[in-house]
Amino acid sequence: MTVVHELSGELLGRLAGGLGGAEAVAGLRRAQYSKHLLLIRYLLDHAGPSGDPARELLERARDADPDGFRAVIGAPLVGGWTAIAARAAEQGGVAPADLAHLSAVALVAAARAGIDGSADVPAHHGLAVLPGLGAFDAGGAASMRVTTSGGRLVGLGADGVVAAGGDGGWLPVWRLTAEAAGQRIELDLDDLHPYRHGHHVPPANRLPAAEAGRWREPFAQAWTMLAGHLPERAAELRAGLETLVPLVQTDPRSARSATIRHAFGVFGLTRPTGAADFAVTLVHEFQHSKLSAVLDLVRLTDPDDERRYFAPWRTDPRPLPGLLQGVYAFAGVADTWRALRDEVPAATARFAETRLQVDRGLTAIEESAALTAAGAAFVAALRRTADRLLAEPVPAAEARAAEDTLARLHTAWRDRNGG
């Protein structure tokens, strides 16, 4: 029986306000899991006989451990891989290695279910990656035979030497863990996955252990801030965020972060220098993830609208969907700075700036006349959130500085775009 995923009006309304809660995030995750299944089925139709071993492993794993199977197939970067591979298949040019990655996913699902089996895992840049777990050094081979037995994965190298988890030929995925105010979170810090790119900045290759360790303290401090000051946002993150992808630091003066459109629950970022920036980045990028998942289920804007709009945080013109993404993300950012005002000295000024950015961008969306009925209801809920943020008192000096900053940015935008 075909199941059609829909967001109830109540859950959509909660998400539209910028904070949907763990229940709404769980609903988005279920829909993403179904999307991954559909795309994997589409890829299997293109795989031919080469897809049979992976198909058989997947079916056995699903029968043995449905919950574990759902966790593996629903993982964020499965979404990134299936989107890339399915797009290539649609265009008639899917690479054999893209199809073969299905074997790696199947092996992880089989190991989790305790199912025995074997498959050839393609090597990417010398590594045979088992998503979410780690990678074997393939020793220059194009692929590596990997076997799972009793839940343990073993790779057989070309020289006949067995490389198993914990041995010198195995690289585990780094983890970030934190606990505060009764909420615990554990994320992958994934510098191995072959489909972790697409963030406009290259993903970092394998981090030295010392560098991976430098992520842990600011992450733990950021989590303490979020769990203590924004427990509902922390609960959302626990329910939906699974993976961070470290990005190459191309400019030491500038932090970067970005979310992949088709990969819910993962985003890329350069290592934040402080806890507050880390906390804000977690909220900011997860807002993008949430809205992207919503857009898989409901259309909010008119696809025929080709106009470009002023986004109050950049000087290039943005299409309406991009402006909505930015406003939604900055509503979360403004709320986070609001909550951190008593702890972070710069938070008041940042709150004053970002709430004005939300208001200005949202006004442009409201005046666009290019929203669907669902989009109009979504934006109306977001407006109520923006108005609550605007009603918060801030010192006059910070309020004036925020208005001056917005005016300068708009002037720069007009000078650049003639609008």
Image (tube, grey):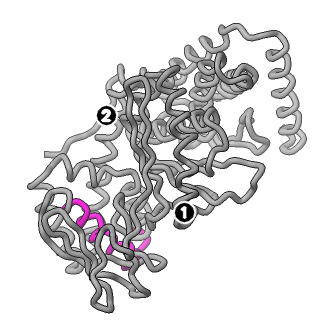
Q: Are marks 2 and 1 in contact (CB under 8 Å)?
A: no
Specify the amino acid type for callout 2: Gly
Pinpoint residue 361: horizontal percent, then vertical percent: 68, 28
Disc sitting over residue 27 in the figure: 2
Instruction: Estimate how packed mark 2 is, as few (under 14), some (14 to 19) or many (20 or more) residues with alpha carbons within 10 Å.
Output: some
| Residue 49 horizontal side relative to residue 167, left or right | left
Q: Is residue 45 magenta?
A: no
Q: Secondary structure at mark 1?
A: loop
Q: Is residue 107 magenta?
A: yes
> Can residue 114 be seen at all in this image of the molecule?
yes
**For the point 39% across and 55% down, which residue is it?**
79
Pinpoint residue 158: horizontal percent, then vertical percent: 32, 90
Q: Nearer the viewer, residue 323 or 57?
A: 57
Specify the amino acid type for callout 1: Leu
Give the CA separation, mark 2 to mark 1. 34 Å
- The part of the chain drawn in magenta is 90-110
Disc sitting over residue 207 in the figure: 1
Q: Earlier in the sequence, mark 2 or mark 1?
A: 2
Q: Secondary structure at mark 2?
A: helix
Question: Which of the image's four quarters has the N terminus?
Answer: top left
Instruction: Estimate how packed mark 1 is, as few (under 14), some (14 to 19) or many (20 or more) residues with alpha carbons within 10 Å.
Output: some
Disc sitting over residue 46 in the figure: none
* Residue 338 to residue 195: above or below: above
* Residue 153 to residue 302: above or below: below
**For the point 17% across and 62% down, which residue is it?**
151
* Residue 46 to residue 290: above or below: below
Pinpoint residue 71: horizontal percent, then vertical percent: 27, 49
| Residue 340 horizontal side relative to residue 297, left or right | right
**For the point 33% across and 66% down, which residue is it?**
130
Main SS, magenta region, reads: helix
